[in-house]
Amino acid sequence: MTARGAGAVIDRPRLSPAAPPVPPPDAGLVAAPRRPNEGRPSFRADIQGLRGIAVLLVVLCHSSVPHTSGGFVGVDVFFVISGFLITQWLLGRAAAENRVPFAAFYATRARRILPAAALTLIATCAASWYASNYVRAMETVHDVVWATFFAANIHFAAVSTDYFAQDNPPSPVQQFWTLAVEEQFYVVWPLLIGAALLFVGWRRRGFDATIRARLTILVAVVIIASFAWSVEETRTHPQAAYFSTFARAWELGTGALLTLALPAIVRVGGRTRALMTWAGVVGIVVAAVAYDGATRFPGEAALLPVLATALAIAGGAGSTPRYAAAMLLGLRPLRIVGDVSYSFYLWHWPVLVLGAAYLGRDLSVEESLSLVGAAFGLSYVTYRLFENPVRHARRLRSPRAALCLWPSSVTAVLAMAMLVSSSIAVPPAAIASLSVGGGSSGSAGDPTALPSATSAEVRAAVAASVTRAALRSPIPDALAPSVDKLRGDDFDMQGCVPGDGTTSRICRWGARRSPRKMVVLGDSHGQMWMPAFVRFATAHRWRLIPLVKIGCVPSLLGSGACGKWYSWALQQIRRIHPRAIVVAQFWSAWGPSGVHAMRRELADVMPLARRVIVVEDAPPHPKPAVDCLLAPGATRGSCTYGVTAKEAHTYADVHRAVVDARARYVRTKQWLCHRGKCPTVVGNIIAYRDRHHITLTYMRFLTRPLAHRVWLAVG
């Protein structure tokens, strides 16, 4: 099974690296209990059924069931419901007690959220130790700590924008980002409600129509500001927007606005309200079917599920209209799913993620649905035997006692995280060697120093790593770098990359005052080859100027930040007047569209320098190095991959395009593959740090031969 997360543009529904999952159902108030409780909204079966539909859409989406790719809109349904019920609770208690009951509110949140959340985090932390390799288990522990403090959205927003983390599998606790959004909202919203009530003169006038109208205006201002931010942030930083509390606040605010509008809503005719409920349900389903991982979300696209949910809730207010959607939403099966929706969401995601991790492959739809069924059973059991008993415990009725759940839950989760961390044994790192037998045939020093490896030695080491005997041998325990250090084994650009910006600092390497200037134009692969370029510039006294933006392939850029950066880079090249331009970027997996784009890029840069050099791209691997090397029973052969027919055609076509443009082509595949076999481990060195980036450790052995090829191409 695969699933896209919030990105690329926004990757959501499938279980794949970069994919953040869809948020859980409302972690806020469940619709009030069947026994009426003072100050709480009366039980509405239609809202509980609405939760059931929403969580089913989310789960089916995560299971990659056809025609449910937009099931991530469940987040909007849950946010609107949460905002509606929370605001109704606060205003109802404020009117009854003539004050905003902050302590009671936060105690209610603690009883509702913490038992199930803490149990899920503890169980997931322990299960990840069993089902995942030690690198992924340590990553899960790290994620668990962020989730424990309800800052998961901040953490996963940073991870989602980390280009080098995009190949990682999804975190089994990634669903906790929504709890973080809601908890951050819950911390602030009661304070804003209290301040707004004082501002509009509530104590002088009571909660009359004038006060309600003033509150409505204030809430509307919050909604408009948050929605405007959401639209702009989704346009410019879609990954960050997906996790942002500020970009989601308008959805919760829409539910709050519904609460304030209830007196007017209940006066609407029953037939009209019945139509509203059906329009709402249909709108949610349409969004779930029509949207997919490429939908820019939240932004304007979130209007459909948000307004549809608002219609469904508003239409069911007051006396239930005849023939309203409540006849569907109130069905007992849907209400049961709605009852356990919070637990169901918390459990289903780690069950799917860890199931895929344990099997070492994507899950089929059938396997996913089987695991989801097991997760539902687990949810129902924990809901009945743990979550509800703790929530309704007599000892936790007082706010002071309930608030003690916060430190106790944090302590329990952190204790499990520390236990798992301490039980993970990390193999020692080896001294880098190109010899399969472990003997020394080179040294990995400073990239500007001269490693002893020559082109012939590297080719011989690659050939020795793909012999029949070598391919049958297990992965060495000690590797260089160690597997847990792979992510950080890259070249330090020393701040010479623009990040999210469209410009960057102009840096100079090599002979910084030399009149002979070379520009490196590219993306993260340009950064990957930099040690060789630095060696060339230092040895032959050239001034080296990198114009590199991570994650932006120049030849495939369109509009947006990447396109603006490319235009800026071309302007800088015209100003610099380099003697040579090196084009070093990711293109091996792009196929015909990438070849066509490369031709356009060559047409852009050929007039700007005396010599243009294109560096042959590294063949991509289908599996991240970490997950391949640490798979049970992994061998050198199971982590050796071939060049596909599509990739072979791309190599040939790009080479032809370079020759046609009268540029120079520098071959590098000879140092990564032998007779079509491309090993992840060469000697005892891990050559690939992820799917398609070379490790700095291995790159240090390639600096001499690649620098020599660049020198020949320049001449």
Image (cartoon, rainbow, N blue to C red):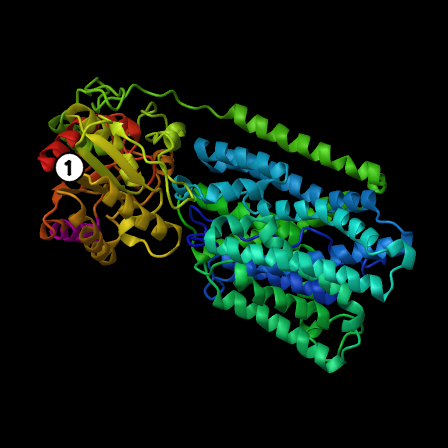
Residue 331 lies in the magenta-colored region: no
Q: Is residue 298 left or right of residue 331?
A: left
Number of labels in the image equals 1
Q: Is residue 566 left or right of residue 424?
A: left
Q: Please check the rendered image and state whether residue 648 is part of the magenta-colored stretch, yes or no.
A: yes
Circle 1 is placed at which residue position?
A: 670
Which stretch did the figure color magenta?
644-657
- Type of amino acid under label 1: Gln
Against 175, residue 49 (above or below) is below
Residue 226: image location, x then y, percent: 61, 55
Which quarter of the picture shows residue 613?
top left
Q: Is residue 369 visible?
A: no
- The residue depicted at 36 percent of the width and 25 percent of the height is 482
Q: Is residue 285 above or below residue 426?
A: below
Residue at point 77%, 63% (across, down) = 260
Q: Position of residue 704 (x, y in %)?
A: 17, 26
